[in-house]
Amino acid sequence: MCILFVALQQHPDYPLILCANRDEYHHRPSQAAHFWPPQQQLLAGKDLSAGGSWLGVNRQGTLAAITNIRAPHLLRDNCRSRGELVIRALSQSVSPQWLQQHRQDYNPFNLLYGDADHLYCYNSLGENLQPLTPGFHAISNGALDDIWPKMARGTQALQQKIVGAAPLDYATLLDIMQDDTEAESAQLPDTGIDSEWERKLSAIFIRHPQYGTRSTSLLLQNHAGEIHFHEVRYNSDGKVLGQESFHFAISG
């Protein structure tokens, strides 16, 4: 997962809104969002290479999502898959102490986890856990609320959609997440990768034959404690392959 936008306690009907794009190699096999057997308690897509996920929610209303931190000089081949952190957060629990103790088992990551009342982001490079305050937030491949062009662009767009008091639906949010505008060269961050890739990855929605946006996930929780989850999947041309929608009430 490469970019997340969060609106926390900002919409009159939905105290929690999460919009996320998963960027990945197109050849990496994955399974569409579904309730995982046998318990059917966890709703998430599945990475069929390593068995983890990039984003999910359980029936108790806990959500989790992962983004890689772009630090090519720190990547190691012998690390555990970061996707298993999402599953652990949804099926067991993660604490600041556990993350601190085990962060070196994984390549650098941001882990978003919690619920509408208590949502946190753990940055493994900074070794810090930040609670998300009411407002608008973006998480990509750096620190929480870094001012990268696509983070600022998406946050502003989400804020305009919500503050404008227009009806909020999946199509409205998908418009934000399917924005393939690339940043000007002068605005690009320097994260240690080739400048051409830096520009390509500066879009919210990435189009490339080998690597790009594989799916968009939209998660909305209303005041009645109901979760609305919608996933759209794309091929290497950015065309829609399929989509799934789920609606369930949070259990106590």
Image: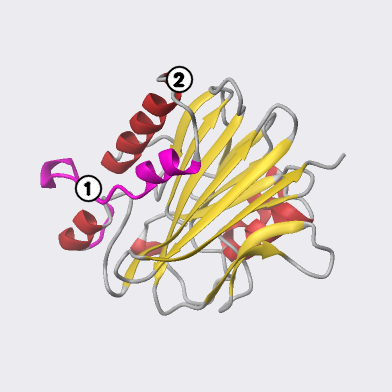
Q: Quadrant of residue 117?
A: top right
For this view, does 104 lie left or right of residue 246?
Answer: left
SS under mark 2: loop
* Dot 1 alpha-carbon crowd within 10 angstroms: few under 14, some 14 to 19, many 20 or more: some
Residue segment shown in magenta: 170-193
The three-letter amino acid code for the residue at tag 1 is Thr
Residue 146: image location, x then y, percent: 37, 37
100 in relation to 33, above or below:
above
Q: Nearer the viewer, mark 2 or mark 1?
A: 2
157 in relation to 23, above or below:
above
The residue lying at 37 percent from left, 56 percent from top is 70
The residue lying at 53 percent from left, 56 percent from top is 231
Q: Quadrant of the C terminus?
A: top right
Label number found at residue 165: 2
Q: CA distance from mark 2 to mark 1?
A: 25 Å
Residue 147: image location, x then y, percent: 32, 35
Label number found at residue 11: none
The three-letter amino acid code for the residue at tag 2 is Ala
Residue 171 within the magenta-colored segment of the rendering: yes
Residue 142: image location, x then y, percent: 39, 46
Query: Is residue 147 at least partly visible in the picture?
Result: no
N-terminal label among 2 and 1: 2
Q: Nearer the viewer, residue 42 or 117?
A: 42
Query: Is residue 115 at least partly visible in the picture?
Result: yes
Q: Nearer the viewer, residue 106 or 211?
A: 211
On the image, numbered disc 1 is attached to which residue? 181
SS under mark 1: loop
Q: Are marks 2 and 1 in contact (CB under 8 Å)?
A: no
Number of numbered discs: 2
Q: Nearer the viewer, residue 143 or 224?
A: 224
